[in-house]
Image: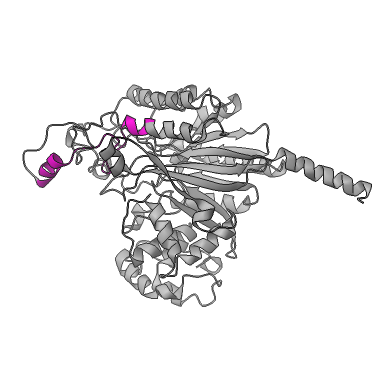
Amino acid sequence: MLAPFGWLLWLLAYSGLAQARTGFFWHISDLHLDTFYSTQGDIYRSCWELARSVSGSNANNAATEAPGPFGHYNCDSPWSLIESAVKTMKAKQGDNVEFVLWTGDALSHSAQPLSEQKQHEILRNITELLGRSFSSQFIFPVLGHEDGSGSYRRLGELWRHWLPSEALVTFDQGGYYSIEQTKSRLRIVALNTNFMRHDSDPDIRTSHSLRWPTEYFTEPKASVSSISAEDELLAEQQWLWLEEVLTKSEEKQETVYIVGHMPPGVDERQMGSQRNQLTFTEHNNQRYLEIVRRFAKVIQGQFFGHLHSDTFRVIYDAKGNPISWLMIAPSIVPGKAGIGSPNNPALRLYKFDTGSGQVLDYTQFWLDLHLANRANEPTWQLEYNLTHHYALPNISAGALHNLAEHFSDADSPWFTRYHRANDVRYGSACPGPCRLNHYCAITRLDYDEFRLCLEKEQLALQGHAPAARVPTSWSWLLGVLGVFYGLATGWWAGRCNNCHIQRI
């Protein structure tokens, strides 16, 4: 028989269990709606219906392949694709969702020359579609770098029905906010990662030459990623605000989801010029990682998009112990051939503990774009369940670290499974150097650590480094990548700080 004090402890524990329940939330990212998309368009010119070139192989190829009713791998999304995705979300889960994370880039890559009013209209149409479909749920939007150059206040007005007044104060100032859940200890922190962005190519005309027809190269307006002196000040205010929010959450024993568009670290699918792989500037990347390490016990999850790929990241402390994780959701847009690896459209449904915020699992849905276009019917299918797909005991930094370590074995099926999901079953090849690029991107978010992960000569000098290191079975790949990236004499040489404590 339990003593009175024992009964009290049991009742308190039972009460806590009774309050905790399993909930669900959707994560959608990178819709890239193109209102100029046409099934009569040219797949080599953004799927726009323009006057075709008289000569050239592209013109001949375009004549034999028309854009499908639900999209094309060369182009941004038609409205039919966006609408089918939202209808699928409603059909699969109904109203049994707590909220929806919408991690940016709603506008087309080609929307930049449009007027601010036209950009706002496109955002409003998507907002109304989501609002009609999830009238009882909150949708938490974050800004992507393709979401127009309008004022934060005007966007705040558009999303006012989802954001409480205290969230709108900081959103109106800088496009970021936090949401305190009234029935749980979970707080959602939404960042404006445009302040952190690394621009790999400041020449807009060059960087978008594969996306914009030459007729539309008038005078593009400055995008939201342009860092002015004012933006630098706003960026610093966001950093200070983030530290303050996390400090208060720590004191109040809250748990936190960090949500943003661009993730820290490098793009695992980009190989070649190092500068094209970076998402944050080096300073902002380091600052973000320092904050996550400091508040790792408070942060229950990190959720990003931008890369259009299905992947994850593990963050380590100074001793090489895995302490935090982040998930990167694939896009609804089917990618861009010639700019980044294409992918099939995807949606993600998370399962979590509504009391603590602990992420329990997620289910990935996908659309076979080839099949949908042939059948003229968008049938979204279950792709995989995270814990089952990778035989994970739970979703934690330790479990994801162990999974990533399996990627080092060329005979292991785990990387094959991961890479099939990475481009949402598009079927891209990933030879040895590609595999190593993925491994280093997943486990080395610090730029110096990533470079050293790929650099053969540096590994030979790190005999005193922590035990966790790049597998020796990949030594030959490091030599290939050393030549491929030009690492030995590259622009970054000599920039590594505190290498003796980094996880190499």
Q: Residue at x 52, y 54 (%)?
A: 388
Q: Position of residue 330 (x, y in %)?
A: 41, 45
Magenta run includes residue 434: no
Residue 8 position within the rendered picture, expressed as x and y whole percent measured from the top left: 87, 44
Q: How many circles with numbers are drawn on the protein?
A: 0
Location of residue 423 with respect to 449 vertically, above or below = above
Range of residues picked out in magenta: 57-83
Most foreground residue, 236 or 204: 204
- The reply to whether residue 256 is visible in this rendering is yes
Residue 347 spot, x, y in % from top left: 44, 41
Q: Measuring 51% from the left and 53% from the top, which residue is drawn there?
A: 286
Residue 287 shows up from this direction? no
Magenta-colored stretch includes residue 58: yes
Along the viewing direction, whichever of 244 and 470 lies nearer the viewer:
470
Q: Residue 162 at x, y = what percent?
A: 54, 26
Question: Viewed as shown, does residue 495 lie left or right of 351?
Answer: left
The answer to whether residue 282 is above or below residue 130 is below
Residue farthest front in this picture: 375
Determine whether 126 is above or below 432 in the image: above
Q: How is the image coloured?
A: one colour
Q: Residue furthest left?
A: 54
| Residue that appears at 26% across and 47% down | 337
